[in-house]
Structure formats: structure tokens, C-alpha cells
Image (cartoon, grey):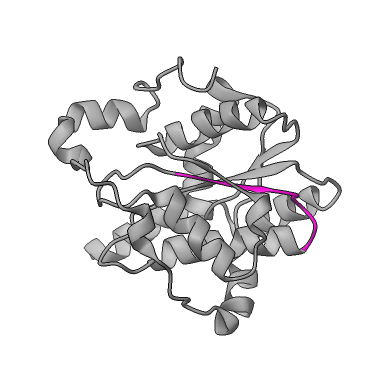
Amino acid sequence: MPGLFFTFLIEACSFSSKATKRLLNKSLAKTYDVIIVPGTPFENLLWGRTMKGRVYWSKYLYDRGITKNIMYSGSSVYTPYYEAIIMTQYGEAIGIPKKHIFTETKAEHSTENIFYSFKRAKQLGFEKIAVASDPFQTRLLRRYIRKRVSMDIDLIPFVVDTIRIIEPSMVDPVIDYQQAFNKEFISLKQRQSFWRRLRGTRGLNVDTTLYR
């Protein structure tokens, strides 16, 4: 029963298949200057299914001409490896040109992934911006994006059916993960209390002085 409830909760908090396809079709009419791809921990020196799905979705959007550039976001939060740099290495390894990849390495919560990346994108002169992640995270962030960041950011959650089609061709390239190692790493769990981390999840720890 707990497993069934958890599955129901995930599905209830995610964009439906119909909604993800609608959002993708909407994006086909545009060409974004950059898409923001939030990070996820690099655990056990392997990229998990979540990171793999997000990176391959970003490549799909780049290959389709939906975006000109990609910005991976994420600090070394729960592991000693900068999530944005790890994702960049995987993105390059599967064929995304290095010159079209940017990083944001300060974010420690998903809300900060969006806020900081949006500010950095604006610094770089990008105007048409979208967020590309999995359906679960994208829906959770939708309200925050609209209220706290910008109404002009579009959402392109990955289409599960499309990911399933390309999954057999997804490779697991070898990367030099030591380049992403943070020698001064201290886990967020040691640096922040549970309540402080909860505030961060809600976007209440954002440092508005960054990327001005």
C-alpha cells in the first residue's frame, strides 16, 4: 500500500502525458536562446536515471532546433561533485557542442536552479528562456517560476513516451568526474538544518545579490 500511495502522489504532482506533449508542441513554434536544466546529485560516481533523462532531453531539444543553448545548474550539494559540471561533461560526451553549453554552479535547491540560472542567462544576453526537466520537478516549480522569477519563462517537461523511444540508444559515456570535484565540500545536510533546507525548497533562501 505505501508503494501504491507514493506512485499516486508522484503522478498527482506531475504533468500528465497529454500536458507534456501539449507543452512540447507549443515550444515547436519558438526557438529559445537557452533552456535551463536543473541538476541532480552525482551519486556513487554514476549518473542516475533522473540526470540521464534530463541531459538526454536537453540534447533532444537542441537537436530539434528548439533551443540554441543549454544551461545546466547545480552546486555540490549532497555529493562532492558540482552537478552542473557533471551534466556538462555528459552533455558534451553525447554530442552537444561545448560552445553551446553554459553552467550555473551556485544553486543548492531547485528553486535556486531557476532563479540563479535565469539571472545568469540575462547577464549573457539571452532573452527567450525555458525550463526543461522531468514532468514531476517542472510542475512543482511552475508556481514558483510564475510568481517569483518571470512569467516569460516557458516550461518544456520531457515527454516520457519520447524518452522511452530514445532510451535504447542512450549510452553511458566515461567522463572525467574529478574535474567536477569540490575539495571544500560539506554536505548541505551538515550546513543547514532541516527547516533551513525546507525554506530553500520553497525559494526562501535565494541570494538576490548573485548574478546581478
Farthest residue, direction right = 29
Q: Give the range drawn in magenta.
A: 64-73
Q: Give the total of numbered labels.
A: 0
The location of residue 45, given as percent across then percent down, is 29, 67
What residue do we see at 13% from left, 37% from top?
A: 190
Q: Nearer the viewer, residue 1 or 37?
A: 37
Instruction: Tell whether 76 sits left or right of 85.
Output: left
In this rendering, position of residue 47 left or right of residue 125: left
The relative height of residue 140 versus residue 54 in the rendered view (above or below) is above
Q: Does the magenta stretch include residue 75?
A: no
Magenta stretch, main secondary structure class? loop
Q: Is residue 125 left or right of residue 40?
A: right
Q: Nearer the viewer, residue 207 or 201?
A: 207
Q: What is the quadrant of residue 95 in the picture?
A: bottom right
Q: Answer left or right for 151 relative to 31.
A: left
Of 129 and 210, the residue lying toward us:
210
143 w.r.t. 81: above or below:
above
- Residue 69 lies, in percent from the top left, at 69, 48
Q: Quadrant of residue 92?
A: bottom right
Front-most of residues 21 and 28:
28
- The quadrant of the rendering that contains the C terminus is top right
> Considering the image in quadrants, where does the N terminus appear?
bottom left
- In the image, residue 173 sits, relative to residue 135, either above or below, namely below
Residue 77 x, y percent position in the rendering: 29, 43
For the view shown, which residue lies furthest in the bottom direction? 168
Who's the residue at 22% across and 26% down the image? 196
* Residue drawn 55% across the image and 36% down it: 142
Image spot of residue 176 (x, y percent): 40, 66
Eyeballing the image, is 49 above or below 203? below
Q: Quadrant of residue 32?
A: top right
Q: Name the residue: 56% across, 30% down.
A: 145
